[in-house]
Amino acid sequence: MTSPLTASASEGRWTPRLWGTLLVLCAAMFLDALDVSMVGVALPSIASDLDLSTSALQWIVSGYILGYGGLLLLGGRTADLLGRRQVFLVALAVFALASLLGGLVDSGPLLIASRFIKGLSAAFTAPAGLSIITTTFPEGPLRNRALSIYTTCAATGFSMGLVLSGLLTEASWRLTMLLPAPIALIALAAGLKLLPRSARERDHNGYDVPGAVLGTASMLLLVFTVVQAPEVGWASARTLLSFLAVAVLLTVFLAVERRSPGPLIRLGVLRSGVQIRAQLGAMTFFGSYVGFQFLVTLYMQSLLGWSALHTALAFLPAGALVALSATKMGAIVDRFGTPRLIAVGFALMTAGYALFLGVDLDPVYAIAVLPSMLLIGAACALVFPSLNIQATNGVDDHEQGMVSGLLNTSVQVGGAIFLAIVTAVVTAGAPEDPTPQAVLDSYRPGLIVVTGVAVAGLLIALSGLRARPAGPSAVGAGSDGSAGSAGFGAFTESTRPAEATGSNEPTDSTDSTDSTDSTEKEAAVARVSVRD
């Protein structure tokens, strides 16, 4: 049965309740990003107050990443099976409680535990929230606008977190932990009233318990290994054995998924060229940005002597540009399509990173820093919404949670892997005589790695522009003709509406209707034929 909320969205009407639903989901995404960015600035104060060693302090950040990145696949599929609304609200309540715990504890291990729990809860709210949007708003301009606003809230939360943390830490680091709690509780109260009820998936062929255990264990071990590798050594026996264990777990996981009647991840999804480009794009996009932010923060605070607040304000133009573009991105996606915007965005991001390679120890902000921040902000405004739209378009409702979890996993794993690589490169080049110029020179190889990752993302995006649909059969095969999952090929150049491809040519309404009916029938046949 279609809910009134979904019916309003299908009719293209932005009712107050529809706006309220989107705001609740945006609040959760805003909190996730806010929490990640706020804790970094507070670390020195936490270490001093709780008497934590550097290795223990690392786990305040890594604990969150471990819970988040390790459980996203499970979180996405759980939302599909048990109901998106239920999973989202329960996880949001846990997030609020963990925030309260984190602000009240007087022990390092308890603080780390609270961070892990927050990451765990975010691993369920993120894919559940994204899948609520994609199942409430119909594919096309309405969904594109909703996703643009939703993803912009993440960038806004991250930027605001940097500024707020600088202000709150001056009073107490505990305020940075406590701030998300009241916001989460308000969102929870509003969500109980506004979020559409979603039925559990009934015909799901049982629960894939072995796949859930293996998938979660492999992701947890992968994130743990990557986070620890810079400290224990990439070539150490511990790291190599851990990577070997990850490979074994993933191999067994894939074997289980192929045979499971109700898999955690239906492997047919990964046969779509469009989907693979979205996942790889998410990894390179977020991975390069995290590495860049890490190096630039070190540069500004350690070498230039800027305060945490000064550093946060230096990043602010990028976040402000993303926030200001929120209401316009949907229309831009409708006109030009996601492949072009992703390619342009990666080109801007690459240029922004490359420009920063020339910084020195006496930079003029408006000349040396601001251009990079504006280019990167423009890139984030184009790429992040487009990746979410590309990954979720054409996906059946009962698999939206799974795909949302997969996309968020790519983001988190990409961030963890590339940050660890950048850290290792900078550490390996650390000078014996740490003069300011020598330290700055040791940062440049890391910036080159960041730029290289962005170039890889650009090449992946350009491959999407070169791909051509193979006629009507592309509906079930992905935009480049590769065998696709259920409905993934439905959003290709051959089946997208004129406004989504950027075409301004008039079309005959009768022919368009017949074509749409034909396309829907072909899509239905394709969905049946390609299911594992």
Image: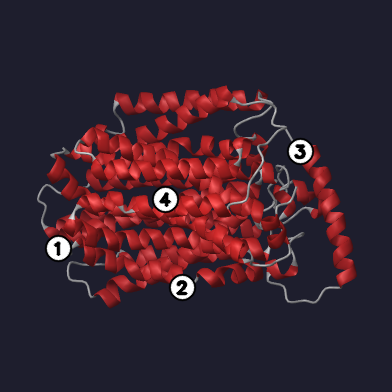
Question: Residue 157 in the image: x percent, y percent?
Answer: 39, 59
Disc 1 and disc 4 in contact, CB within 8 angstroms? no
Q: Amino acid at mark 1?
A: Gly
Asked whether residue 63 appears in the rendered view, the answer is no
Comparing 333 with 399, the one in front is: 399
Q: Earlier in the sequence, mark 4 or mark 2?
A: 4
Mark 3, residue position: 530
Label 2 neighbour load within 10 Å: few <14, some 14-19, many 20+: few
Q: Is residue 83 above or below residue 176?
A: above
Alpha carbon separation for disc pair 2 and 1: 30 Å
SS at mark 3?
A: helix
Q: Is residue 444 left or right of residue 400?
A: left
Q: Residue at x 42, y 67 (%)?
A: 377
Question: Residue 188 in the image: x percent, y percent?
Answer: 47, 50
Mark 2, residue position: 324
Q: How many numbered marks have been drawn onto this rendered protein structure? A: 4
Asked whether residue 466 appears in the rendered view, the answer is yes
Image disc number at residue 185: 4
Quadrant location of residue 272?
top right
Alpha carbon separation for disc pair 1 and 3: 58 Å
Mark 1, residue position: 305
Q: Amino acid at mark 4?
A: Leu
Disc 4 and disc 3 in contact, CB within 8 angstroms? no
Alpha carbon separation for disc pair 2 and 3: 41 Å
